[in-house]
Image (cartoon, rainbow, N blue to C red):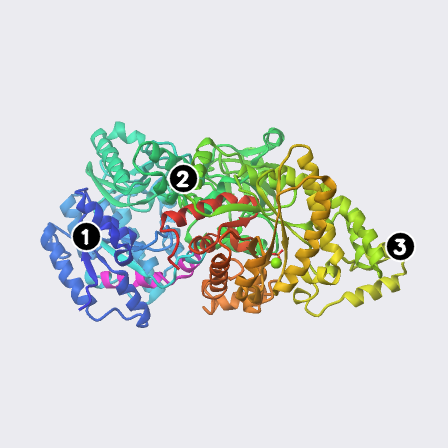
Amino acid sequence: MTKYIYKFDEGQKSMKDLLGGKGANLAEMKSLGLPVPDGFTITTEACIEYLKNDAELPDTLLEQLNIELDALSQRIQKSFSADESLLLVSVRSGAKISMPGMMDTILNLGLNDENVKKLATKTNDSRFAYDCYRRLLQMFGQVVYGIPMAAFDTYFNQYKTQHGYQSDADIPAEGLQDICNHFKEVYVEETYKPFPQEPINQLTEAIEAVFKSWDNDRARVYRQLNEIPHDIGTAVNIQEMVFGNSGERSGTGVAFTRNPVTGQANLFGEYLLNAQGEDVVAGIRTPKDIETLRAQMPHVHQQFVDVSKRLETHYKDMQDIEFTIENEQLYILQTRSGKRTANAAIHIAVDLVEEEIITKEEAVLNVEVKSIDQLLHPNFDEQSLKNATTISKIGLPASPGAASGKIVFSAEIAKEQAENGNKVILMRPETSPEDIEGMIASEAIVTTHGGMTSHAAVVARGMGKCCVTGCSDVEINVVDKVIHYPGGTLQEGDVISVDGAKGDIYYGEVATMKAERSEAFEQFMSWSEDVARLQVRMNAETPQDIQTGYQFNAKGIGLVRTEHMFFGPERLIEMRRFILSDTQDKRIAALNKIQQYQMTDFEAILKLSGERPTIIRLLDPPLHEFLPSSVEEKNNVAEQLNVSVRELEQYIENLNEVNPMLGHRGCRLAITYPELYVMQAEAIVSSALRLKAQGIECQPEIMIPLVSTVAEFTILKDQIVEKIEQLQQEAGDRIQYLIGTMIETPRACLIADELAEVCDFFSFGTNDLTQLTFGFSRDDAGKFIGSYLEQGILERDPFQTLDQNGVGQLVKKAAQQAKAVNPNIKIGVCGELGGDDKSIHYFNQIDIDYVSCSPFRVPGALLSTAQSEVKGGRSRV
Ligand code: PEP
Ligand code: MG
């Protein structure tokens, strides 16, 4: 019989696959002797079976559930039917990978019309008992029967207003009793059946609801966004209730062992007295700083400080801990690695190494690659800020970044506007999981309620999205779509700017500035470099981009796309003159002019690179990309080139290709116009010789694109070498240079051993290689890739993440064969996949020496290579 249920005593932290993160950690904390309320976990296997079997619970699950409930009752001497020692439980989902706000929780399960009276008598507190019951009715109704939250909330809020109660805590027992009675009527109105009174029925329905919620839309969206597989299911944790809402000596809270925004090494958290479950994160009441607990309940505070230190050292990472205090007794309900900003992640990793809690290899694994992007996020320009009009400065800096956009009031409109190309800022009183798609679509999120652990704050930090919460001097009227703030009003569509690092909101658009990096960042990146095997180069051609890449410690340039240098107006006209020339002499004359521009460019690039290797790729795209298309442009060009518009159109017509990506491009251009590559090679080498004469050594690597045969390469290489030899003789000096090829066609992969004999280096152009291996046009694949992903034909877009089974195998075998015949050959990857985390893990395990990507992706790529090495390095594919 499959074991579907594990007591907390039977699990441990390594069992996340089966028990989910929450279940495994509850078990681990139990084994550490921490104060965890007793309970058990229903496995992810049970969820998978349930979903596979068309929403049928596995055969023996109910049998096992009864046995485990009896065992729990025995252990804690409580039961669902006892008068004095009444058992109430919480039911919480918990997948292997934490999905905050995505799945659902039910508290106080076991209460019914009878048990609520027993609870009132036992605690001598009817208010508390009915408060628990109304919460159960609300949560159960929403989670299990899908009753809209508003069906309960509207009545609850009206009731408070009618009776003049300021806060929930002011409602007396009789009021809560009335509310419970009304909530039970809501069940009948909404679902045509009463609230289930039998605790075991409540429990099985709740378990099924958690299983079902694995497949709800917002859970799917979250998984998609975070690349969590859809088939791993969720576990369900059933745990004895402890009550943070049983008076002023009780409470509930959430705390991080370190500051999740800055990384500072001090406890950071919030709590509310006389509150339960979601109260702290829901933003209904403003929570208190954990520090004030020291004064209110010193021994509980001290105990919590000790527990958090212990958990952090045990898990070797910053923890996010949920706790409840029941009559001054501390209980820990959950621990997990805390979500944090990239800045905090770096500081925490560096501090933990310095505190000797982790090694630098472990530190490298503690920072998510995608969070590195956040560090490179812009800030507002200080000067522009001085002139900006403030809307609010009292919000909380929930997630850093600086963004401007038009105000929208709902997730739906946010999505719609973003799809139409508008930048929007989502403004809400608070957010809930339903808002997830709108949050993704927005540049920033602003809420008027909620603290640093509110839904908006946690989710935005996870996404690396700018967010300000608790902006309480701003009043949002979602219905009338208007905002009142101390200085005036704002309407939907007005532009505002949000500073997520400070918590400030400004009117209009404020200019942004590039991100600055800290010492800790440099330290962390240098550890990543120590650990990494693969080198990281950059794809860049402008001095500004090259400088950026070198600031990020790129080890050289992996790809200069020379065609990007031809788009300035004075250059373009010479390029057009070259293309439209009908004799070689005319072509050479045009090329001589282009060469002047090229030399200036190459000299600047090579100077910035110095001795770092610099791959310059010779011209690649089909020539008609350089030709005019509009009537106006054609008229201009015809005039400049001194030809008639008719003649020009005839040339254009002649150059037209049915499949330009498969046509006259790459090395094929130089096979037909040899002077083209010779001119470029001459520009590169003469620039290098000139620099050498000034005392600057450099290492150009000349790359020939789109090669499919050895002869293509050798013919062009011989022409280039002849020119280089001539230049070196004339200069009376020699430079260090290499000549290699891009590997972009399946045929080139298959003859990699032959090519390796004549090439100094290979660089896999995975954009074209993916295009040609699948036969998917890289420019049109967007039209159908979505359907392929939806139908599960492909797991990922192969232009974004390497297709390991197909393209990956070609790369692997080609690299292996090349190294076998030419062990000195340098092999890199310079397509988009060179900056993608998963693809880099693959490249790290095969015969690749470096990856190359755009400058801002360099730090992330470096971290990916380091992580891949720590996780096991080579020879696992
Ligand atoms: C490639 O094909 O992967 C590549 C880097 O070249 P381009 O994208 O310029 O075709
Ligand atoms: Mg290419």
**Is there a contact, CB below 8 Å, between mark 1 and mark 2?**
no
Residue 101 position in % (x across, y down): 37, 51
User: Percent from the top left, x then y, of residue 768?
Assistant: 59, 61
Q: Position of residue 118 (x, y in %)?
A: 15, 51
Q: Nearer the viewer, mark 1 or mark 2?
A: 2
Q: Quadrant of the N terminus?
A: bottom left
Identify the secondary structure beneath mark 3.
helix
- Alpha carbon separation for disc pair 2 and 3: 59 Å
Q: Amino acid type of disc 3?
A: Glu
Please name the residue that numbered disc 1 is placed on: 8
- Residue 362, quarter of picture: top left
Nearer to us in this view, 567 or 114: 567
Mark identifier at residue 345? 2
- Tell me the mark number nearer the camera, choosing from 1 and 3: 3
Where does the image place residue 628, in percent across and percent down from the top left? Answer: 79, 58
Which span is picked out in magenta?
A: 203-222
Q: Quadrant of ligand 1?
A: bottom right
Nearer to the camera, 193 or 426 = 426
Between discs 1 and 3, the one toward the N terminus: 1
- 349 with respect to 590 (left or right): left
Please identify, in this view, whether the residue under mark 2 or under mark 3 is nearer the observer.
3
